[in-house]
């Protein structure tokens, strides 16, 4: 080995000596000793590999204690910084799955702090002091808003589908239209989900057209249920037809079957009042004769991730008693957030002001344009060398909700001299502000419909740091 490399290797400090340094002493007051030692060891090993790989000349001047401590500090920061952290959503996708879907209402989050810091009445009746099922304590608000007799909650809507089919139709046939054999995120397909439940899928109709007679002809002595699945994350258009829920309910009643309506994203209110296309609501499903209705809690409701099951009391009780129920039940944080968010739906007029999902979706276009102009002004002051162009754009609700409905918006097209769009987008994500946008026409686009006015200075500061 060349003498130069040997000298560089000899200059590397030991982990023991590094642990006695003033810098390491400060780290040890904040972090466990094994973690600090691991980061120091990793830093030494990384420099050793660089030297052995032939970079001795480059490393010789930077292989001392200070260099190792600097590198170890970077490793320690990465190891202790939470991976799930606050981010700024400038993608124009309101319910962005990668960015946590629904932004929880601020007053809802604030109202849970005391319960999260201490004990709470998760599964106990205050009046009697007796144990209660945790989902029963929020059943009152779900039945009030949907008109159902009973309700329960599980950890997502896919789990709700599996649980309901397992509890009500295991080893029996369930009839589904071929046009409703959906695939949800992560390549989870309805036939596969149904197979896991133990129910047997019976497909009827065609991809684009299914008639009542198709269902009638498919009913046998082994049929337990009819499952209608609302295609909330896609649309079939053109020469199409499907059987109205009320007609399916009549058939189910005549043949003593259970009618299950999976609404997917799920709406509690008519979205027309917010200027959005109508989505079938849980109340409409119950009124039209569905025995059990399933929907998501973190999409159009905008609460924590969960799956809501409402319907006839005798059927909900069967679902509650199924062994899978314990495997898919939700925790106290989910139930607290869901209950408090549902209270907002008692007064729809409050939603636009207090619920982030509806506030972002319903913000007037002139307000959004003004926000874009304000951000451009901040950038002109803090990052004058950044090229900025404001243009009209299209935002979307996201997460499989209203897939065809574009929401008019405004975005800033950003470019930094001598920096590619990919590099700029990455720098924005890695900045302390953690800004997510999208790339189009070799520019980074920041849609401000999904940004709050309070976040504008942080975005401008991030671009100022990057551009400088």
Image (tube, rainbow, N blue to C red):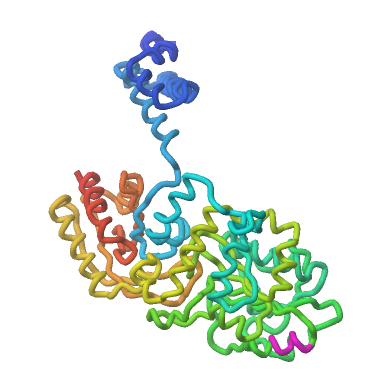
The residue depicted at 41 percent of the width and 30 percent of the height is 75
Q: Is residue 337 visible?
A: yes
Q: Is residue 151 left or right of residue 93?
A: right
Rendering coords of residue 382 (x, y %): 16, 50
The residue depicted at 40 percent of the width and 61 percent of the height is 105
Q: For residue 439, which quarter of the picture?
A: bottom left
Rendering coords of residue 209 (x, y %): 64, 87
Quarter placement of the C terminus: top left
The residue depicted at 36 percent of the width and 61 percent of the height is 91
Quarter placement of the N terminus: top left
- Name above or below for residue 398 compared with residue 3: below
Rendering coords of residue 448 (x, y %): 29, 64
For the residue pair 23 and 191, the one nearer the viewer reads as 23
- Name above or below for residue 415 compared with residue 228: above
Q: For residue 293, which quarter of the picture?
A: bottom right
- Name above or below for residue 87 compared with residue 254: above
The residue depicted at 31 percent of the width and 48 percent of the height is 433
Magenta segment includes 242: no
Q: Is residue 57 visible?
A: no
Residue with the most extreme right position? 221
For the residue pair 368 and 349, the one nearer the viewer reads as 349
- Name above or below for residue 211 compared with residue 178: below
Rendering coords of residue 180 (x, y %): 63, 77
Q: Which residues are magenta?
A: 249-254
Magenta residues: mostly which secondary structure?
helix
Q: Is residue 96 left or right of residue 58?
A: right
Q: For residue 7, which quarter of the picture?
A: top left
């Amino acid at each position: 080995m060349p003498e130069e490399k040997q000298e560089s290797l000899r200059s590397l400090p030991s982990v023991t000596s590094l642990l006695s340094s003033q810098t390491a002493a400060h780290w040890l007051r904040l972090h466990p000793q094994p973690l600090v030692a691991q980061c120091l060891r990793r830093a030494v090993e990384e420099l050793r590999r660089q030297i052995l790989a032939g970079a001795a000349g480059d490393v010789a001047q930077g292989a001392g204690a200070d260099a190792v401590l600097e590198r170890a500090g970077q490793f320690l920061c990465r190891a202790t910084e939470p991976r799930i952290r606050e981010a700024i959503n400038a993608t124009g996708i309101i319910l962005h799955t990668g960015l946590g879907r629904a932004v929880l209402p601020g007053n809802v989050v604030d109202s849970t702090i005391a319960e999260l810091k201490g004990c709470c009445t998760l599964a106990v009746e205050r009046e009697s002091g007796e144990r209660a099922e945790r989902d029963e304590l929020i059943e009152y608000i779900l039945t009030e808003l949907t008109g159902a007799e009973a309700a329960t909650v599980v950890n997502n809507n896919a789990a709700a589908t599996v649980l309901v089919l397992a509890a009500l139709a295991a080893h029996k046939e369930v009839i589904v239209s071929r046009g409703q054999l959906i695939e949800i995120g992560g390549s989870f397909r309805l036939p596969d989900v149904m197979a896991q439940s133990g129910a047997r899928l019976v497909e009827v109709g065609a991809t684009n057209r299914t008639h009542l007679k198709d269902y009638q002809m498919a009913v046998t002595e082994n049929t337990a249920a009819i499952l209608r699945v609302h295609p909330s994350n896609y649309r079939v258009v053109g020469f199409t037809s499907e059987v109205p829920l009320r007609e399916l309910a009549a058939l189910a009643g005549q043949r003593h079957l259970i009618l299950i309506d999976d609404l997917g994203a799920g709406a509690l209110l008519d979205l027309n009042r917010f200027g959005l296309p109508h989505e079938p609501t849980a109340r409409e499903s119950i009124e039209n004769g569905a025995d059990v209705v399933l929907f998501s809690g973190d999409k159009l409701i905008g609460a924590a991730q969960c799956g809501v099951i409402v319907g006839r009391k005798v059927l909900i009780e069967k679902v509650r008693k199924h062994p899978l129920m314990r495997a898919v039940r939700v925790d106290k944080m989910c139930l607290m957030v869901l209950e408090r968010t549902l209270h907002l739906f008692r007064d729809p007029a409050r939603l636009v002001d207090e619920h982030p999902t509806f506030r972002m979706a319903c913000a007037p276009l002139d307000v959004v344009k003004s926000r874009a102009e304000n951000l451009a002004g901040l950038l002109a002051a803090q990052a004058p060398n950044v090229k900025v162009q404001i243009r009209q754009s299209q935002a979307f609700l996201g997460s499989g909700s209203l897939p065809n409905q574009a929401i008019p918006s405004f975005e800033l097209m950003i470019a930094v001299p001598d920096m590619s769009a990919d590099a700029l987008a990455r720098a924005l994500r890695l900045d302390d502000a953690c800004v997510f946008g999208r790339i189009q026409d070799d520019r980074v686009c920041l849609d401000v419909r999904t940004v709050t006015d309070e976040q504008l200075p942080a975005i401008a500061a991030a671009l100022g740091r990057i551009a400088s």
